[in-house]
Image: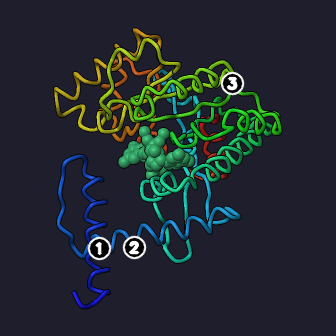
Amino acid sequence: YNSDKALNTLYKESDIALYKSKERGKDKFTFFEDSFLDSLVKKNDIYTALKNAIIDFNEFHLVYQPKFYTKDTKKITGVEVLVRWENPELGFVPPDKFIPIAEDSGLIIDLGYWIFEKACEDFLMLLNQGIDLKQISINLSPIQLESEGFLENIKNILKKLQLDSVYIEFEITERVLMQNNENTLNILQSLRDMNISVAIDDFGTGYSSLSYFSKLPVTHIKIDKAFVTNIDKSSSIYIINKAIISLAKGFNLETTAEGIETKKEFEILKDLGADKMQGYYFAKPMSIDTLTNYVNNLEDT
Ligand code: C2E
Ligand code: MG
Ligand code: MG
């Protein structure tokens, strides 16, 4: 141990291994591998680039994916906004890669307000052109929801734009609700009091207790793609979908099946009574300009 450098490396590597163990859950141990360093460096690169990108937001743009009524798949019931990030050095970074880093670092808060305001502006612009998309759904991370002044800021943005809150829906994942945090439930209730809709996204992927259904201030659940895929091939997946939909109906919640890619999946979920549909089978996420054309063409057919 005559070299400080070696000792430093050892510390650093054990630290990374510890970090990795934590990621894998409690009571795990991990031996250091060189590849860990790569992923850590990459995370750090993404963080640095992200921090710069949220100064002027020029590297971000939004895409919109339509949702349809099951009973009339020519009628749009709303659009979900999805963020895209194109960095000069890193290239296209998918949301699944950078959103968790934005959450861990708190950068999601500023980015989230930018997404919310931009999406509302786009929605309003189309409304002024006579295109009524009915509802704009915005994904919300727990960090945003629990951040200071969240409700006030949302109210202020809507007031500034003069957009009616009935057009707004927030999508939150089951994880948020599983913590059963009193404060979170109060914020959701306040959103409901403002007439904002709340959907549980990726439903079925967490391990939530069924009893919470009765007390949650939500309006809508989105069945995760994992349950939609292979619904025509696996009887257990079919049974799960059937149970989720009947449970939701019992509690007066709307259901959307997301990630529908085939006609078969669509037909089975239609039979099971899912209210709304979203997925590549109907439409992929698209820019606001493409969406405008798309909607105009829908109305013509
Ligand atoms: P999510 O909210 O569940 O969004 C659905 C994802 O599935 C989107 O991926 C969408 O492009 C994709 N998708 C939709 N239909 C299909 C289909 O038929 N087949 C397949 N294979 N995929 C389909 P995307 O845009 O990569 O987003 C991934 C996740 O990143 C989102 O999951 C959401 O959790 C998060 N995310 C995206 N945009 C935002 C945002 O603006 N704010 C926050 N907080 N999170 C976001
Ligand atoms: Mg979503
Ligand atoms: Mg989802």
Task: Note whether 287 is above or below 80 in the view shown.
Answer: below
Q: Position of residue 121 (x, y in %)?
A: 74, 44
Amino acid type of the residue that numbered disc 1 sits on in the rendered structure: Tyr
Judge depth for marks 1 and 2 and give the one in front: 1
Q: Badge 3: few (under 14), some or many (20 or more) residues near its Cα, within 10 Å?
A: some
Which residue bears the numbered disc 1?
11
Mark on residue 166?
3
Visual colour scheme: rainbow
Q: Quadrant of the N terminus?
A: bottom left
Q: Nearer the viewer, residue 166 or 176?
A: 176
Q: Is residue 258 left or right of residue 233?
A: right
Who's the residue at 50% across and 51% down the image?
103
Identified at 26% across, 73% down, the residue is: 35
* Cβ–Cβ under 8 Å for marks 1 and 3: no
Q: Is residue 287 above or below residue 233?
A: below
* Residue at the spot of label 2: 41
Which amino acid, by three-letter code, is at mark 3?
Val
